[in-house]
Amino acid sequence: MATTEKLPVAETALISFSVNGYPVDVAASGTRRLSRVLRDDLGLTGTKVGCDAGDCGACTVLLNGDPVCSCLVAAGQVAGCEITTVEGLAKRSPLHGRLQQSFLSHGAAQCGACTPGMLVAATALLEKNQSPTENEVMDAIGGVLCRCTGYRKIISATVEAGAAVAYDPLPAAGAAVGTRLVRLDGKKKVDGTEIFGADETPVDALAVRVIRCPHHRARFQFGELDRFVADHPGLLLVLTAKDVPGIDCYGVIPRYADQPVFAHREARFRGEAVAAVVGERDALEALDLAEFPVSWEELPALETIDEALDAGAPRMHGHREENVLVRGRVACGDVEKALAEADIVVESEYETGFIEHAYIEPEAGFARRVGDRIEIQACTQSPYMDRDDIAKILGIAPDKVRIIPTAVGGGFGAKLDLSVQPFIALAAWKLERPVRMVYSRTESIISTTKRHPARMRLRAGATRDGKITALDFAADFNTGAYSSWGPTVAGRVPVHASGPYRVPNYRALTRAVHTNVVPAGAFRGFGVPQAAIAQEQLYDDLADRVGMDRLEFRILNALDNESPTVTGQVLGEGVGIRACFESLRARWQTARTETAVFNARADGPLRRGVGVAGMWYGCGNTSLPNPSTVRIGLKRNGRIALHQGAVDIGQGSNTIVTQICADAVMAPVAQFDLVSGDTSISPDCGKTSASRQTFVTGKAAHMAGTKLRAEILKLAGACDCAQIEFSDKGLTIVEKGTSCVLSLEDLPLDHHGYVITCEATFDPPTSPLNENGQGSPYAVFGFGAHMAEVEVDVDLGTVRVLKVTAAHDVGRAINPTLIEGQIEGGVAQGLGMALMEEFFPGRGENLHDYLIPSAGDIPSIESILIEDPSSIGPFGAKGIGEQAVIPTAPAILNAIHDAVGVRIQKIPATPDRVRAAILAKANGGAHG
Ligand code: FES
Ligand code: FES
């Protein structure tokens, strides 16, 4: 299977045009993509490439003032034309400075991968119309996809770009936490200088292309590989499993590691790598991979959970019986007895499909060998985990591997697993030349992890007065060919499937089941969003049967500080779920009334509905060590180096961790120099996942900052109550009305190169779970509740979401703008999950067929921030990243039921499924 698209070979010609006001002459084939000319020939890497197919809009530039997808424009077409890229917008128009400013102050750029395309598209609009409406902005940016922001802040930033926009200056000492500090790494995202995985290429870099299995399962045999290399000038090497010098087996959870870099004789999923071809870049681009000498024997594949569990099914991994990777269990009370005695019992089944992460930046990076070390610069969510796996694969010590994370253009969980890294590392190690690789969109989709499809069955019981007495939950997750994060999903879901409610009798059983499809892994929520879809719809059914208002039913049953969770944990503080629900009460009542009036008057096909759903989510690993270490160093010029290795994938950890650390030191944010998560210079802050960075790394930063403050005061011989005034010239210590200057210039430097270095490690206190899943799996939970208002067309089955109101208990809002950004982005992903997103392995492996929400799909979103602090988190903060996505889909699905009285049991609720359910109900069926 060819996984990198090849342009037709054509004659090179000199093409003259202007870029950002400068004339350029480029020797290129007339059919070469303009995006390639800009990025590769002219070094204008601000223009991003997300799909090479006109689907994502990341490559948008202005062609004679009009926005175009530069990946679809042939270089020959721009002869004599004027091109403007993101790098040239500021020069083109003073409008742009205001637009950039507006993007920064609104928090409109998260990861920043879509930002250049967004800015270009918005500029094109503003040049014609300086006071656009929201709808005009939505039309203008409709062709540019963003997976992070939920578009709302991009829309507001563009609408308000004409106003005098000035963002707050950096906060003073002690005043950073709680402010809407502009993202500290934001400027690079809006001026096109941010470096993502594909944005740097060492001059003599070779390229790699991977040969991947075209079948769900196949045995394979290679032909004459040496001959193939010899017959193709510019090719240097073919890599296969026998070229892996270390252990050809990796995985994010070492105990379950099972994935080879290259399959051995049999490939277990379509898209699995079997070999890689390495060579000069031009030669590889011209190579037709269909010529690669490999023959395939397609084998019967296990594509579904049922096929894999069948008693006669072959075992995909010999030691895993029944093709079950792992089982999860949490149980308390006596669920059967409680259900038998319940006044009311309801039951249901729900099914969800694969979901693609669809971040705008495909995986990319390069590796180079430096003596007996390997250096890898790539996009990743987990530099230290990458380091350890690459060391294993190469058979070298971990300290011989250096991982340099680039900016990450969205990850959402999938960039926790290795992608390009093993291929570029092996090739660079062997050939001793830099090697670069950029996944095509198709390659990214077919080979990287997905959200687990789930099949869930559940029963719940309640008393006549609405108290939940029991929940019985069972779920199977299709975990694909290799383990990835399957054990985490199977382990986390049973803890969370009760929802944020008191459920005294409970049983949740899960299985992660291997099949011959692409591995399922981490995706924002680790299975909890799927479980919430089932449990929150069932609780609505229970409330209806009891005859209670659905929101009041949840408030009645909400966990509080004293009630034990289903694992027997009593949190004792910071259980803000009731406050989340109560914050919705007035809006709920108004929306219910307005909806009833609308429906009573409706004489066409439109019906409205309102739905609500709750969530809880444990921050960090489940009952496992989970440490982050932060190092800070005082420099001789009084500035502070903050080594925080939490990779910022757009969520804002660079900014939030600095805010926390600054207030711990009581120093101004402006005094800090951020040092990245490069494994050779920053300690391990763990992976960016499980909503742990604000909580865990933030706490480590708080501890390190507190220590630094104490050390400085000790050095000055001052008391704890003294103030430290920072400036680039040194420190002034103010104590009891007198001040003295603490000169740092002549002080010795330690082995880190600082006058004072402080390091702190925080590992959240948890306890192991027993055989019934009882214990304290997380130190802190985040809580939330969403309310969705929808409009359903009963004739077409289409659903339009009118508004989502999202209340979240974040403990302490360290940076409200960034938190709102997480919520809005989570709502957009939840909306996609509810209504449109489903990936079918082997079909629609692109962003044309796989639909994610675009600007026009996004409703108004109102965020409500509740602060019920945790004494463990930094300044009381909890996580928000995963939490934000969980309640949206069930709230929308409950709203659909409220509107038209049908339950959509197979998610997403696409128009055909909604329409079929409405027809079934009309014909006497109960469900869709
Ligand atoms: S890269 Fe051009 S539209 Fe996606
Ligand atoms: S900020 Fe838009 S894709 Fe990340």
Image (cartoon, helix red, strand yellow):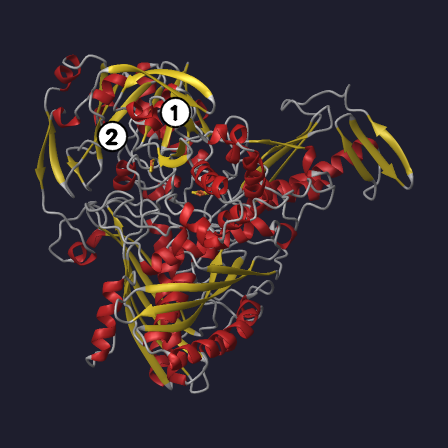
- The quarter holding residue 583 reads bottom right
Indicate the secondary structure of the residue bearing disc 2.
loop
Mark 1 within 8 Å of ligand 1, using the beta carbon: no
Q: Which residue is mark 2?
A: 4
Ligand 1 - quadrant of the structure image: top left
Disc 2 versus disc 1: distance between alpha carbons? 17 Å
Indicate the secondary structure of the residue bearing disc 1.
helix
Q: Amino acid at mark 1?
A: Arg
Q: Quick one: 802 or 839, which is closer to the camera?
A: 802
Residue 778, percent across and down? Answer: 50, 56
For residue 554, side relative to residue 924 (left or right): right
Q: Quick one: 473 or 5, which is closer to the camera?
A: 5
Residue 714, percent across and down? Answer: 79, 34
Q: Amino acid at mark 2?
A: Thr
Q: Which residue is mark 1?
A: 39
Residue 912, percent across and down? Answer: 23, 64
Query: Height in image: 863 above or below 159?
Result: below
Is residue 463 in view? yes
Disc number lying in front (2 or 1)? 1
Query: Height in image: 39 above or below 372?
Result: below
Mark 2 within 8 Å of ligand 1, using the beta carbon: no
For residue 63, side relative to residue 448 (left or right): right
> Which quadrant of the rendered structure holds the C terminus?
bottom left
- The quarter holding residue 897 reads bottom left
In the image as oriented, which residue stretches furthest toward the right?
Answer: 737
Q: Residues within 10 Å of mark 2 (few under 14, many from 20)?
A: some
Q: Residue at x 66, y 49 (%)?
A: 179
Residue 691, percent across and down? Answer: 49, 50
Q: Quick one: 219 or 863, which is closer to the camera?
A: 863
- Mark 2 or mark 1, earlier in chain: 2
> Which quadrant of the rendered structure holds the N terminus?
top left
